[in-house]
């Protein structure tokens, strides 16, 4: 019986994975974005592969801010471009591969913190939600926010529970996060607030000692760039943070409450009658979570969830710049945990009839979201490529313009020897 249940869990896992891959790679070129960010990354790949320019940093956090993420995404992206001979189809392939990585990470983390059932529901919601499908298919460094956020949360969970070996994973993921998006700065106050709960022994010091070089190696290019830019420019991280910080105001804090829960809004966007519960989800989760048993591990989970929610919320109430919805992507793992745990708690209990209702609701949720995505019509790479080729066939020359996809297509079809090898 146990083997049968295990096999059933593996089968469901693989079926969801198949659906996940299908949705992320369906009509890959037709539905893939090739806009400003993707064109910039494509030219960076060209600089690395053809001109052998090795950047110390990646994309800017904001245009003309002087605040850059690390260059690791650029190097991995260029590897995909190498195999496609600079054809930009490399970018959506990379995005699809990252989404598969995210799938495994989410399942692993949620299974180890909660249970296999909760993990399966979480990856299913993440697989079929219109919002997550759309974001996963955009080729950009933001794709890595969710898996790294999940692993950093899991590392802290294990460390506070006494397994200090996870300091190595924490330092690795923290360093990698600085190559992904500027919201990685949120992890620093989260870790600082978690420090009092770390085990205080020689083993902790030992792994801290080994962890620091890992983090330092990963951020070394960023440090070099920051030192150089500080000497030659008035821009940099310190200037950027100083410019866009206006201090904490309670009114501003309350104003962006909707943004703080935007991941709930987005995941439940097509079932709006549930969205109104977003402010009550966490209190309800805590009540259900502790109803059966109160223990230290559950307390640690709730403590970390509160930090994951409050730190971005408080930070952006201080931030005066424009806020985009994906800035709160680091909260998605805990949103998926809460939604999935509540679903399992409500529908998978002693009343079997409720299980069938729960499964039906999941199927309806998937149907609404997937059909909405499949019926969506948007301008993709295929259309952009076709327009560029028509201009090229007409004999016109397309001049270089930053962020312009036509100029990149003109380069790979008319000027690039590497692309024709």
Image (cartoon, grey):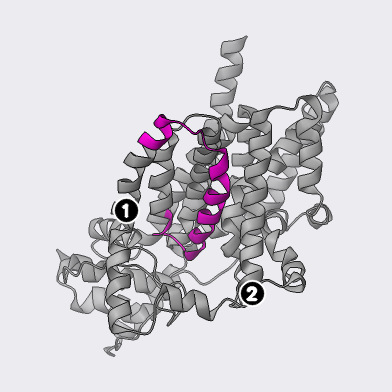
Question: In this figure, which residue is indicated by the disc labeled 2?
Answer: 247
Task: Confirm whether the magenta stretch covers residue 196.
Answer: yes
Q: Position of residue 194 (x, y in %)?
A: 56, 45
Q: Is residue 94 left or right of residue 55?
A: right
Is residue 67 within the magenta segment? no
Q: Earlier in the sequence, mark 1 or mark 2?
A: 1
Tell me residue 348's x, y (percent): 77, 27
Q: Residue furthest top?
A: 1
Residue 70, x across and y down, in percent: 35, 63
Count of numbered circles on the image? 2
Q: Residues within 10 Å of mark 1 (few under 14, many from 20)?
A: some
Q: Position of residue 11 (x, y in %)?
A: 55, 26
Disc 2 is placed on an element classified as loop
Q: Quarter-wise, where is residue 320 in the image?
A: bottom right
**Residue pictured at 29% horizontal, 72% vertical:** 227
**116 or 355, which is in the foreground?**
116
| Residue segment shown in magenta | 177-206
| Front residue of this view, candidates 289 and 342 | 289
């Amino acid at each position: 019986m146990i083997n049968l249940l295990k096999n059933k869990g593996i089968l469901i896992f693989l079926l969801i994975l198949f659906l996940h891959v299908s949705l992320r790679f369906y009509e890959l070129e037709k539905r893939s974005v090739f806009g400003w960010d993707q064109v910039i990354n494509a030219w960076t790949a060209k600089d690395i592969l053809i001109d052998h320019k090795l950047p110390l940093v990646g994309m800017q956090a904001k245009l003309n801010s002087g605040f850059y993420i690390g260059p690791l995404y650029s190097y991995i992206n260029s590897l995909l471009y190498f195999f496609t001979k600079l054809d930009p189809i490399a970018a959506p392939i990379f995005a699809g591969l990252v989404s598969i990585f995210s799938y495994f990470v989410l399942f692993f983390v949620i299974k180890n913190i909660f249970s296999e059932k909760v993990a399966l529901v979480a990856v299913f919601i993440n697989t079929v939600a219109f919002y997550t499908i759309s974001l996963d298919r955009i080729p950009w460094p933001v794709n890595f926010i969710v898996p790294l956020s999940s692993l950093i949360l899991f590392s802290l969970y294990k460390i506070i529970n006494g397994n200090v070996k996870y300091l190595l994973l924490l330092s690795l993921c923290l360093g990698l996060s600085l190559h992904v998006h500027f919201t990685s700065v949120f992890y620093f106050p989260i870790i600082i607030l978690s420090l009092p709960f770390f085990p205080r022994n020689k083993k902790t010091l030992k792994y801290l000692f080994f962890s620091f070089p890992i983090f330092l190696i990963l951020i070394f290019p960023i440090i070099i760039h920051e030192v150089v830019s500080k000497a030659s420019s008035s821009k940099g991280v310190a200037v950027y943070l100083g410019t866009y910080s206006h201090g904490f105001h309670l009114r501003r804090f309350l104003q962006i409450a909707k943004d703080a829960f935007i991941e709930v809004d987005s995941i439940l966007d097509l079932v709006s009658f549930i969205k109104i519960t977003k402010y009550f989800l966490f209190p309800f989760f805590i009540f259900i979570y502790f109803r059966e048993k109160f223990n230290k591990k559950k307390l640690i989970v709730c403590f970390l969830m509160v930090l994951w929610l409050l730190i971005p919320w408080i930070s952006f109430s201080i931030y005066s710049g424009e806020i985009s919805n994906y800035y709160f992507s680091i909260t998605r793992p805990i949103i998926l945990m809460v939604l999935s745990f509540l679903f399992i708690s409500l529908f998978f209990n002693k009343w079997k009839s409720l299980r069938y209702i729960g499964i039906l609701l999941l199927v309806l949720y998937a149907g609404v979201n997937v059909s909405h995505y499949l019926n969506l019509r948007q301008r993709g790479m295929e259309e952009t490529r076709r327009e560029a080729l028509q201009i090229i066939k007409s004999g016109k020359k397309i001049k270089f313009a930053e962020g312009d996809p036509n100029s990149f297509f003109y380069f790979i079809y008319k000027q690039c020897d590497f692309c024709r090898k």
